[in-house]
Amino acid sequence: MNILRTSNLYKVYGDGDASVHALRPTEIRIDKGEFVIVVGPSGSGKTTLLNLLAGLDKPTGGNVHIKGQNIFDMSETDLTIFRRKNIGFVFQFFNLLPILSLEENVVLPLLLDKKDIDWTYIDELLEILGIKDRRRHLPGALSGGQQQRAAIARALCMKPSIIFADEPTGNLDTKSSNEVMELFKNSVKKYNQTLVMITHNPEISKFADRVLFIEDGMVSNGKVIG
């Protein structure tokens, strides 16, 4: 079952001779529970694609359907609410608030949405991600890998249907990158979530169910891994 699909999705910046085709017309289908990685060199259109899929940017044309809903038919308010309830984000820069503990950073989206905190689930997340013993520490006392794991826990705390990750291992060394990718893979499998990740590092592809390749704004469907 497709949890995400695009129809003739494209993005052009500028007009006439100065126009840049950041994303060429694209058809993508992603199933529930699938781990998809988008690989491409710098400037290939990866971030443009991710921002469009997540509804963070508007396309020049085409549509994105998530859970059967065309997100670009929604008002800004409705789209914000839809994202908050259905989508998790993990970015290259961890974006943790320095005055809050790891645990406080993780549950912040729940507090902002005025939701009850399922502490059993939060404890399980922190245990799976290997940071339960660091929950009272401020971000400045954490390693880069631990900060990224906290960012992953924050993305998972709302139990989103789909997670978008933008170069989440870009600031990590090889050992930490591999650990984070294993944790990503295990956590999304455990909770049957869908993960779409972009990276310029082809070595990360080994963790995915499927790889999409993008270059000069053109996406190819790649291959199923395994």
Image (cartoon, helix red, strand yellow):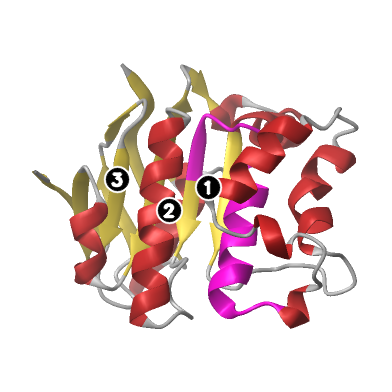
Q: CB atoms at circles 1 and 3 under 8 Å apart? A: no
Q: Name the residue under label 3.
A: 36
Q: Mark 2 points at which residue?
A: 183
Q: Which amino acid does label 3 sit on?
A: Val
Q: Which of 18 and 61 is in front in this view?
A: 61
Q: Mark 1 points at which residue?
A: 128
Q: Which amino acid does label 2 sit on?
A: Leu
Q: What stretch is highlighted in magenta?
A: 142-163
Q: CB atoms at circles 1 and 2 under 8 Å apart? A: yes
Left/right of residue 88 with respect to residue 30 in the rendered view:
right
Q: Give the class, few, some or many, for how many residues have Cα within 10 Å of label 3's Cα (few <14, many ≥20).
A: many
User: SS class of the residue under badge 1?
Assistant: helix
Residue 226: percent from the left, percent from the top? 9, 43
Left/right of residue 105 with respect to residue 205 in the rendered view:
right
Q: Which residue is drawn at 83% across and 64% down?
A: 101
Q: Does the magenta stretch include residue 53?
A: no
Marks 2 and 3 sit apart, C-alpha to C-alpha, by 15 Å
Q: Is residue 23 above or below residue 16?
A: above
